[in-house]
Amino acid sequence: MFEPKTPLQAMIQAGDVPGVLALLRAETPTQRAAHRPGLVRMVKLLQEAGWRPDGGDWGARPTREQRHSMDTAILLCGTTTDVAEAWVDDDVLVSVGTEFRPPSLDGLADALLEGSPLKIRTVQRLIVAGLAERPDSDGYALGLIALPQVARNAGTLSAMFEADPGLRRVLPRVFDIEGTGDVSLSSSDKYNHASMAWGPILLALVDDGLATRAELLDRTLDALERDWPQYRAGWFSRFHGELAPTDDELRARLMRYLALCASRIAPTVTLALAVLKQIDAAEPIAGDALLDALRPVMASAVKAQIEAALKLADRVVKREPRLAPRAADIVAIGLLHDAASVQAAVLARLASWGVDDLLRTRLGGLASGLAATNRAALQTLIANPDLGASKAAAPAAPTRIAANRGPVDPTGDDRRVAPIVDPDELVDCIAHVFEHADDVENFERAVAGLLAGAPLADRALFAPVLKRAARMERLLPRELARLLRILVSGEAALGSVSIDHRGHRSPLEKLLVGRIDALARMSRSGHRLEPLATPTHRGGYIAADLLARRWQAYVDAGVSPDEKEQVHALLRLAPAGGVPAQVRALTDAPFVRALRYALADDILPGAERVLFAAAARIRHPGADDAALEARHPGLGPDGALAARFVWRVRTDSHVGQGKTYTHNHFELAVEPRAARPADYLPAVLRYCTEDVEHRYLQWWSFAGVDAGAIRYLATLMPSDLEGFFAEGAQMVGGNIDWWEAQWQNRAYLEPLLDPTTRMGPMACLLLALALAGKEPGQTAVAVDALAHAHADGRFDSSQLLGDKLRALLATPLLKAARLHKSLQAALRADPRIDGFVFELLCTAVQARPEDPPRDMTALLHLLLELKVAGARNLPPAANKAISAMKLGGNGRSLQRQLLQP
Amino acid sequence: MSTALQTYRYATPSSLSGDKRPRLALSTAVPANGPPPRFFEGRMLEPAQVAVILTAVHLVVGSRFFTPPNSVAKAIALSDPVVTCGGGVLRFEGFSSCCSAYVRADMLPAAYDGQVITKGTTNVDFNAPMRAALARVRDEHGLELAVGPDEVTLRCGDAEVTERQVELPVRWIRGMVEVQSCQASMRRRFEVAAPEALRFLRTLPRASTSRTPLWVVPSPSGLFTTTREAANGVRVTDTRRLRVLETLLPRARSLAVFADDSQQASAWVLDFGASRLTLALSPEVWRGFSGEGQALRALLRASTRSAGTLARVRSALQWQPRLDAVKLSGELGLDVDAVEDTLRVLGASGLAGFDVTEGHYFHRVLPLDLSEVEDMHPRLAAARELIDAGAITVTKLSPFEAAVHSGDTVHRVREKAGALHCTCPWFAAHQGQRGPCKHVLAAEAARGY
């Protein structure tokens, strides 16, 4: 607790402002400076007390008088930096500063702005009061940009301009700096009221004779030439439009506009092209110069820019036909654009302007990525079909995954998880899990290694990992560390479960914490056995014969494993296509009967419903178990009856500040609905979080927000991941536009890449959603999943995924343009998928034919490309849907081409 | 020390003058005593190409692809590029302010018609107005290039010098030297024609992919990306860093891609015929090149060799654009391994750069005061402390095992499949991909390499 050591400190603590002032008035500057060290500490205490509920070491929330006293004292006794960092009240700065003119005011304006541009308000107070010179720094320019933000309304901003007559004169300084993520001209206009937009503020300078149009135009071009990031540079393009330069003003700066065509910022190039068009219309630009300027534009990725450049080139060639060969040479690079319409436009120019031998050879090198619909036109141009097929510096063919038929056997030898037998390897593995919190496989290996035969008494062996064990925070390393501390150090390390902001405990964490507790109890009772549910194969699978061997070891040791562990083992059982001899040889026991039931042996479900419910999920993956339902009815989804999923997209909108905001919610429900079961049924529990009615509002899904936990969930019942994918669809679909950075959701997509995974309805739903997601990393995983699942032969047909795409495209949730990009990426990754994508598109385009979703033309483009490239015909249903579409312009042309037989 | 103060002094800003006969005058840094060096005077044979290449260097230097969460997002260029002139090659090197992208433009003798006046390395002023003017360069107007002041200016000599000081983060300096070692570990993975490369770059997402490593893979139908590790691919994160190549590719012939065997960093080289542009990317955008530890073993081994080896190799550098270890070993009568190690050490000391296309080091002296950086290689220093403290106990010779006493913990270093493994968190996290940990380094020293 703070104890004052000097009378000044005591006065500050007492909030005695007059006392502080009187004391410091009586002191010399040297005497005041001697107070500084103690005051700096007090400033920190007061700042901390301001946000700590208990007031920290200050003891309570500081009073206004205490703050006022502190501000006064630090202003008079501290340095410039001390004052800048002390958040001194503006009124104190002005009143006390005016009376004392302390040395701390020297350079204070720049020091304040260095800390935050939002301090411009304070700086302006100092300037108006004559306590500071107007800075000429970039920090001040940044502060000027922040003026609307700190003023909050137009009235206050006007008052600031009136209070400081020199302020408006320096406003053009805002052109000189790029700004920051928080403070830039773009963000100022975006987030402040329109009455404080920067355009009118700056144009008013011209009206008032404080700046000239030429100055503003030149400064705008200066800024555009610097190629600042697009978001920030975009403001200058817009301001250029507001300035509306005359033809003469533009012509005088022709060279600058020509140079702006080489900008890497798309809006800047668009602006330059529009201006060049205007200048050229008023008075023709020299053809050579204009064509040269268009060269980089033709390599642009923006379709509209290439089209604008082609039109300008048309004008040049029309005026100066001698430039046709040069124009042809320049526009040829436009063939690299992926839009077939752009390629067609370029080819039309080339046909019209002529192609010389040099260009003909070059065109051969550009042919490889040309749209199928344009290949004939190119071949006509180059008059040599062989050139069109040539590929420059074609790299070696990569190894492709051979086309397989269906999911692979999860218990193949190449998928075996090697148990840890070497104590040193165990330590390495534990250290690895501590640093790789999502690695479920090694987590399970390490847990098994600790329980099965590790020299637990050898503390020195585990010393390197024990040292860090108490500091583990993420779920898997935390639980492994807890087991380590219990077994090796003998600590009574209790498990903890995360709680979300609504007070719900993470369901999966509860499950895992319980499992580790049970395993620790078994080990402490002196039994050194591998956990029954440790996966034997990748993906969390347990091979039936190895499980039988493991059970026999328990029997031989006279140990009965925890029933929950038995349930987990059964849920992880890999389908075996029969009952292996090792299982048949086991002595009868409830677990053994459940195991045989799971392996489709000809027996009836027993009385032990938790064991048989788990076994039923293996015996009837994704299907109902009528026999179990008859014996143990009402267990819930994925109990005796398989879970059924129903999804919808709900749209709501509201109006705020004159704008309409629309939100699309992806909602998924599971049937049959169930209350939290009394028994330990993990498969059922996945659908029964604590607050069933309000689940969609909850932070927690079953797995929560930790990628390691999600991966662990995937190993809970690996032979049927439909429930897992349903949860993934809910999480990915609920964040499709990346409102929140939910990086962990990628873990839901990873099993789609596993060659053992069957592409069922929920897998397809998740994949369809993820293919249209906004976050590029997550989408890239989905693209890989699509390509791999196809190459593995894991899609029964294209129908299931196509239906999901069609259903989602019929809602406002899915953006066709994103789906188009993803499908193109999949085609690049594996061209053999073209037929499958064609079929997908044929189904997907049937969504709302009477009112096609936005960007449907992108999908139609791709469909046309695949139709022509593969010489395919549209199926009748697709033909009918496309015929019914009401499209305009480019879409209608596409429609016509698609409907041609 | 987290930063080192670097002073840039220029007599005049670099500028491009003359519309009809443009002349690009690049201002070299003024040393503490004496005039600024005058490296080159001549005519560039492909002006527009040179302009876009120099623009790319400026862009990378001014880029910040990652801002640490606790930092103010001020996009500032921390350091001016470095120009090296030697053996007829003009090289411009730069490093992004986030330390994740290194760029070097090499103008080969066929790129110019001019005269190399002096050999050496120094900083060169690149400024925004100059870069804006570069966009106006046209082939038909030609381009005169001067690196360093002309003779008249040199004779006047008393022009006012503009001084600018920046605080360079130590991780930036470490990265700038470490990137040379990283490149030395790389090998060519694939090469594609420029049109295909451009087509591919356009397919890359515009948003950051820093959280998702992508493998760029060649195939008969072109390059594509995948999130799956691909043996014939190259790993890259945050593909926004590659976008700087997009404006260059229409003028380039081909793109060659290099990567090391552990798929950490990569180098992307554009071939323009008479010029080359190398863009080296760190493994993660937030990580930079510092801490890659590629040269640590060489540095440790070098400390056990006689100082004469280093001095002899260093004296043979002579601003050569191609330092061939075999040739040098023959000339100096030294072991090839020792010369290779020494070149690596020189690279890690800022005294040599690495040309990944040629596969050789070249001589250049980084104009940074590295003596102010107390601790360029903290892991190496820590390993030396362990060795000096006698903290290593070799418990087994084959396969090798040692106990390393580090603080209050004893870490075990063990040989597995020919490589040394350690129980420390660094090794567990990186599995040796970011160079050896201090315990492995110390154990290797105890074993005697």
Image (cartoon, rainbow, N blue to C red):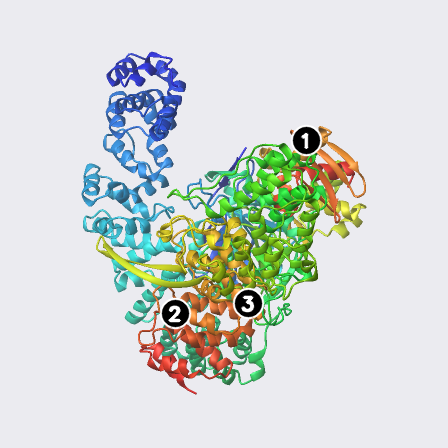
Three-letter residue code for mark 3:
Ala
Label 2: how many Cα within 10 Å (few below 14, some 14–19, many 20+): some
- Residue B278 can be seen in this image: no
- Whether labels 3 and 2 belong to a single chain: the reply is yes
Q: Are marks 3 and 2 in contact (CB under 8 Å)?
A: no
Measured as percent of width and height from the top left, residue B409 is found at: 66, 32
Q: Secondary structure at mark 3?
A: helix
Three-letter residue code for mark 2:
Ala
In the rendered image of this protein, does residue B89 appear above or below residue A100?
A: below
Q: Which mark is residue A789?
A: 3
- Residue A270 can be seen in this image: yes
Three-letter residue code for mark 1:
Glu
Q: Which mark is residue B385?
A: 1
Measured as percent of width and height from the top left, residue A836 is found at: 51, 75
Q: Which mark is residue A807?
A: 2
Q: Which mark is residue A700?
A: none
* Chain ID, mark 2: A
Q: What is the spatial separation of the Cα atoms under label 3 and label 1, in whole angstroms?
A: 53 Å
Say left or right for A654 vs A267: left
Q: Secondary structure at mark 1?
A: helix
Quadrant housing residue A397: bottom right
Label 1: how many Cα within 10 Å (few below 14, some 14–19, many 20+): some
Quadrant housing residue A450: top right
Of circles 1 and 2, which is in front? 2
In the rendered image of this protein, does residue A189 appear above or below residue B368?
A: below
Q: Secondary structure at mark 2?
A: helix
